[in-house]
Image (tube, rainbow, N blue to C red):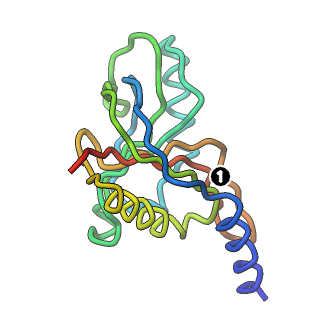
Amino acid sequence: MRKGIYIIIYNVVKVNDMGKVKLEKTKPMKIAYIEHIGAYEKIPYDEYYSRLYEWAKENKVRPGFSAMNICYDNPEKTPPEQCRSEIAIPIKGTAASDKEIKIKELPSMEVAVIKHKGPSSEYGEIYNELSQWIEENGYEWAFEPIPAIEVYTKKPKIVNGETIIYANVKVPVKKK
C-alpha cells in the first residue's frame, strides 16, 4: 500500500510541480552560514536555521526570507560522512563572523535553475535533469565559486513518512 501512495505522489510531483530549466543571472549576495560535514539527508536544518536567524537578530542584520544549502560534493561519488555543505541565509547589514557562523559574499553568477517540489529522494533525478539540459544547451558546470545552491521556497513537509522539499536548485554554468 505504501508503495502505491509513493507512486501517486511521485506522478503528481513529476507532472505538475517540477519546472523546466531556465537560465538566470543572480545578484551578488552576502550570506551567513554554518558549515556541515555529513550526509545531506541528515542535516539538522531546523537547528541550523534557528541558530542563523537568532544570530542575525543578535547582530542586528536583516535576514532574507529564502534559506539555502550550498552543496559541495556529489553524494553519488563522495561518502555521505564526507559530504560538505553550508546551510545559509542571505543577510543585509554588517556583522562579524564567530566560531560557528561565517559570513561571505556570493558573486553574481549565471545559473541553470529548476524548481523542485517533491521527495528529497528525487534530488538525484533533478541534478541529472539539470546536467542533461546543461550539456544539451552548450553549457558546462562552472563549479566556481560553488557547485550548486538549493534555495528553499517553503519549509519541508513530511508526507507519508517522506520529506517533501520545495526548492529552486541552481547550478552555476558557463558556455563551452
Q: Which residue is mark 1?
A: 156
- Nearest the viewer among 69 and 130 is 130
Q: How many residues crowd mark 1 within 10 Å: few (<14), some (14–19), many (20+)?
A: some
Q: Is residue 76 above or below residue 106?
A: below
SS for dot 1: strand
Give residue 96's quadrant in the image.
Answer: top left
Q: Position of residue 143 (x, y in %)?
A: 24, 48
- Residue shown at 27% from the left, 68% from the top: 78
Give residue 75's quadrant in the image.
Answer: bottom left
- Residue shown at 35% from the left, 62% from the top: 136
- Residue shown at 31% from the left, 61% from the top: 135
Q: Position of residue 80 (x, y in %)?
A: 35, 67
Residue 161 visible, this orientation: yes
Q: Residue furthest front?
A: 137
- Nearest the viewer among 119 and 81 is 119
Q: As shown in the figure, which amino acid type bears the numbered disc 1? A: Pro
Number of numbered discs visible in the structure rendering:
1
- Nearest the viewer among 54 and 70 is 70
